[in-house]
Structures are given as C-alpha cells and as structure tokens.
Amino acid sequence: MYLSETMLTLLVLVACAGAALAPIILLLLYKRDLKDKSLW
Amino acid sequence: MLEAQLDWGLAIAILIGFGVLWVAFGWYLGRDNRSIDDYALAGRNVGFAFATATAMATWITSNTTLVAPQLAYQFGIWGMVGYSMAALGLILFAPMAQRIKSLMPHGFTSGDFIRTRYGKSAWAMFMVISVFYAMGWLVSLGMAGGILLSSLSDLDYHTGMSAILIICVLYTLLGGLKAVIATDFVQSILILTGVVIIAWVCIDKVGIDQIHSQVSDFQPELLNLAFPAAIMFLFNNIFFGIGEIFHSNVWWSRAFAFKTGVGKRAFLLGGLLWLPIPIVTGFVALAALSLGIIPPSADMVGPLVAAKLLGSIGAIFVFIVVFSALASSMDSLLAATSDLITQDGYKRLINPRADSDKLLKVSKRVVIGLGVLTWLLCLPKVATLGALLNFTGAFVASAIFPIVFGLYQPRLTGNFATAAMALGTVTGLVLYFVIGFYVAAISACLMSLAICLLGLWLAPGKFDWQTFKEPDNVPE
C-alpha cells in the first residue's frame, strides 16, 4: 500500500499549517500572560 | 560541502551577534535571582506562554532539524511520521507533570522523587541512567554543534563546537532557568519561522505533485506504508522518546518550575505544537530527488535542499535555525544536569546542611564544570552521533515503568523498581548489539514492565504518598 499524492499533499499541508500556527499561538499566549502579569 | 556555504566572516558575525544577545538577555533575567529556587527553578512560577514554548523548544534539538530529513530520505513517510511520534513523550508527560507538582510542590529533581519513593539502591541505579544519558546528550549536542556549523559554513569543527558551548554556558550561568526558558521562547519562534519558510518555498518552487511523482518513479519504497524497517523504527522511537522525557531532570525541573495548574496544559500544547515539525522538516528532504541532489552524507540532505532552494539566504536561515535548535536544548540540559548534581550529589552526599546561598554557588560552578567537561569530551570529533544517543535508548526506556508506577501505584517496591531498571537496561543493551539500535528501547521497556508487574504480583508494598510531605523530604 503506497501513499497517494492526495494523502501526501494533505499530510504536508496540515503539518505546515500546524507549524505556521505555532508561533502565532505562542505570541498570543505571551501577550495574554504579559497583560495578566503572569509571565513569571 | 554546501554550494551555498556561509563564509567565515558572516558565520562568526551571526555567532557573535546571537551570542551577545543571549548572554545580555541571560544577565538581564538573572539579575533578580536571589535563591536556589530562583536560579534553578525560575521561582517556581513560570506562566503558560513561556512554559509551552520551553517544553516545545527544548524538544526541538539539532536532530529534529537534521535527522528528521535524513530519516525521510532513508525511510520515507514512516521516517518523518515516526520521528514526529516523539511528541507522544511530551503529551503523555502532561498529566505526570501535574501529579509531580501536587506530590512534591517543593521538590527539586527527579532524583529526589526516586530516592523518596524507592530508596537508595533505586536512586543509585537511576542516577547512573540519568547522568549517563545527560552526558551522552550534552556531548552529542556539542559534537553536533561543531559538525553542523562547520558543514554549514567555513568555520572549523572546534570553533563551532566551542562557540555554542561558551554561549550556552555563559547565559545559563548568568540567568539560570529563567534565562533558559526566555531564550527558549525566542528560539522557538526563530526555529518555527525558519522551518515554515523553507517548506513554503519548497512547495512553491518544486511542488508536492512533482515530489510525489519523482519519488513514485525512482524510490517508491519511500511511500510504502508497509515498510517493515521503518515501522520498527517508529515503535522504537516512541519508546525512546517517552523514556527520555519521563526520566530526565530536564523535564522534571520544568514540572517543578511551572506555576501550579500550568504543567499539564503546557506539556500537552507543547507536544501538539511540536508534532508537525519533523513532518515539515522531513518533507523537504523528499524534494532532493526532484532537485537532483545527492547528499555526500544522509544527514546533510535538509541543509542541501534549503541551500539549493534559497541560495545564500537559505544557508543563513539553516544556520540560524540549527544554532537555535542546538542552543535551546543545550542550555536546558546544562541547567537541569547542574540541578541534579547539586541537589542529588553535593547536597545529598557531601553537604546535607548546605543553605540556599551555598547551593547557588555550587550550582553555578557545576554549570561551568559541565561546560568544560563537555568541551573536553567533544575535542575528538566522532561522526557516529546517532549511535551514541541510540545506545542510551536502552538505559532511559528501562526507567519508564518504574517512574509511571512510582507516581500512580503505591504497591511497587524499591527492590523491584531497581531490578526493573537494571535488567531492562541489560536486555536493551544485549539486543542493541545482537539485533540493532532499533530494538534497544522497546526491549528495555518491555523487560522493565515485566519485572514491575512481577513485583506487583509477588511482593506488593504500600507506599504512603504523604512521605513526600514529611520534613526530611522537603527542602528548607
């Protein structure tokens, strides 16, 4: 059983979307903690 | 080696620029450190944003950015998906982090836990595993620093290795865990941005359809979902990753340092954010065939593809991403191993009456000592880095079940926990040499589980969880 082009595309695009979202999520969390004065 | 290698001057400029930035940052964050709690555990009050970033960034090592592409190049789909399964270690540690914080709100190290829960013989066995693994990881990171920075630029091996060690030792020394965690946050943003840009350019310039058709025509095995060696690698990697995280003080020190209620959420989100990274970095390697790249060694396939796609800008990107990935793990390891040696070695065995000021001084000296020792061990350049870390797979995987049962099951006794770690390690090492690296962790883990279950059946004990709260087990 071999991975089809559709499945490879789906796997790569989902992974890239996840990796691209990660820094945005981290920066939003940072902004929230900074506002709440709960960084440390 | 690379057609778009950085010249010596630019590489040195990047190293000095980042070095000065990190060290100044470390000094700034460390200026309020007054006690060993501030220095070693960032005041035990780390918030959700920094906690998530440090969980993720510490787990992004040079291997994530270089071995994941190598595995995709050699094992195909299962190589990169198998590597991404190492995220399970972080995800499964999430509930344990909460349990650790509630059982030992004033704890310092994983060694503290093992000694209180199982006694001295288990603690001694555990310390052998912990220190062997920590030094193995430190040396492999130091060597990787030298090898990678010299492959990506005109720097020689010893300059690259020394630079990364000096920078990490300096800012860890000045700022303690606070500096480690804050730099992890910045490093995680740098790594993720660099990796996503390289993947995006790869999709734009080469195309997933082109990559799929080239691999299908010339190396169809890489797309085979029933590739036996790759599936074996996947399972071994899962147990190796879980063993690394469950036992290492790198992660326990974070469980102690995170604010109450933050540990579980931070490790869970950190694991989920880490999960796609090896797939993104691995996928880039599949483009090697379409780009006509034949790497001189498989671990250089990622940088070669990035350099081909982005030219000299790509080389700078890769250099910064690799440097950040190395630093984000090395600083954590220096800080956590220093805690382990200070608390479990110095305070436990040499000076039980040492106060916070004394421990703070000792901890800083240990950071310098670890840096010097790592530098000395890294002087001879050894190419088989993977072999060194895979060798530790047998050690760390044998600690998985003694720790899990130790946290949740009061009936497992110290004698059986010690036997589980010892016999698990021996089994893993024997099979490492008889069969191969890809069975060391899984066999060590299964043998250790069998001994633990035997202990629960033959000689159940009755540990009182309140023991962790007794004055003898709570640091002043």
Image (cartoon, coloured by chain):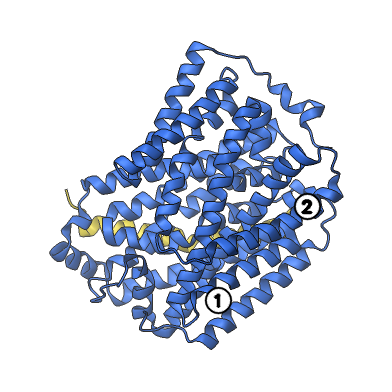
Which residue is under mark 1? Answer: B159
Is residue B4 found left or right of B190 in the rendered image?
Answer: left
Which residue is under mark 2? Answer: B362
Chain A rendering hue: yellow
Query: Which chain comes out blue in the rendered image?
Result: B
Residue B280 visible in this rendered orientation of the protein: no
Is label 2 in a helix, a strand or a loop? helix
Q: Chain of mark 2?
A: B
Label 1: how many Cα within 10 Å (few below 14, some 14–19, many 20+): some
| Residue that appears at 58% across and 69% down | B164
| Residue that appears at 56% across and 52% down | B135
The quadrant holding residue B288 is: bottom left
Label 2: how many Cα within 10 Å (few below 14, some 14–19, many 20+): many
Quadrant in which the N terminus of chain B is drawn:
bottom left
How far apart are labels 1 and 2 at the CA level? Answer: 28 Å
Q: Amino acid at mark 1?
A: Thr
Q: Amino acid at mark 2?
A: Val
Is label 1 in a helix, a strand or a loop? helix
The quadrant holding residue B107 is: top right
Is residue B353 found left or right of A19 in the rendered image?
Answer: right
Q: Chain of mark 1?
A: B
The percent coordinates of residue B118 (x first, y second) are 63, 25
The percent coordinates of residue B209 (x first, y second) are 22, 67
Q: Is residue B239 above or below residue B51?
A: above
The percent coordinates of residue B236 (x first, y second) are 37, 42
Q: Is residue A1 above or below residue B211?
A: above
Whichever of labels 1 and 2 marks the residue nearer the N terminus, that label is: 1
The percent coordinates of residue B66 (x first, y second) are 41, 64
Q: Is residue B223 above or below residue B130?
A: below
* Residue placed most toward the observer, B130 or B245: B130
